Image (cartoon, rainbow, N blue to C red):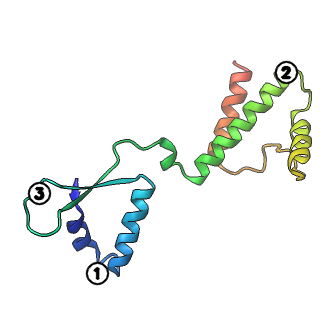
Amino acid sequence: MVRLKDVQNALVGDVIKYESQFFRIIKVLTEEHLIHGFVDTESREPGKKPVYIRLRERHPDYFFDTRDDLLSKRYAELAAAKELLKDCGVEDPDTAIQNKVNEMYGVTVEPDDGTSEEDPRMKAIRERMERDKNPS
């Protein structure tokens, strides 16, 4: 827990150019539930009551996911969905997915053969799925 005035004194002028920018940043951080601010109503200091801020105690994991993490998760979900479609008797899940996307959104998509991704995490996911399908 930190007094807002102390943070303001430390940042405004050196790191943040204007005081109004500082308060806009604090407002956005509060609205996004990254920090929590509260007024010390029991303070006996003269003048305005001090305002304190602190980080929220728990953040969902997705707050810290990068774009690549999210993309990797989506590809893993797509690969799992294709496996489920195969298990349900769909012979060519890529074509079925392509037709459904075209039907729903009017967008033609190319089937993913898995070679277009250069992300090493996707390669690891594909290798693990292959190992799970064909245990040695």
> In which quadrant will I find the C terminus?
top right
Tell me the distance, in whole angstroms, between the alpha carbons under discs 1 and 2: 63 Å
Q: How dense is the environment of label 3, judged by Cα within 10 Å: few (below 14), some, or many (20 and up)?
A: few
Q: CA distance from mark 2 to mark 3?
A: 66 Å
Question: Which badge, 1 or 2, comes first in the chain's sequence?
Answer: 1
For mark 1, give the secondary structure.
loop
The three-letter code of the residue at mark 2 reads: Cys
Is 75 positioned to the left or the right of 49 in the image? right
Q: Amino acid at mark 1?
A: Gly
Nearest the eye: 32 or 92: 32
Using the image as rendered, state which of residue 57 and residue 87 is in the foreground.
57
Answer above or below: position of 91 versus 63. Answer: above
Secondary structure found at label 3 = loop
Question: Dividing the picture into quarters, in which one does residue 21 lie?
Answer: bottom left
From what the image shows, is residue 14 above or below residue 96?
A: below
Q: Which residue is mark 2?
A: 88
Residue 26 in percent (x, y) is at 36, 64
Q: Where residue 43 is drawn, which disc sits there?
A: 3
Which residue has dot 1 on it?
13
Identify which residue is drawn at 60% across, 53% down: 67
**Residue 129 occupies which quadrant of the picture?**
top right
Residue 65 location in percent, x, y? 53, 48
Q: Three-letter amino acid code at disc 3?
A: Ser
Tell me the residue at 43%/63% (across/down). Answer: 28
Of residues 126 and 94, the one drawn nearer to the viewer in this rendering: 94
Task: Tell which circle, 3 or 1, labels the residue nearer the N-terminal end.
Answer: 1
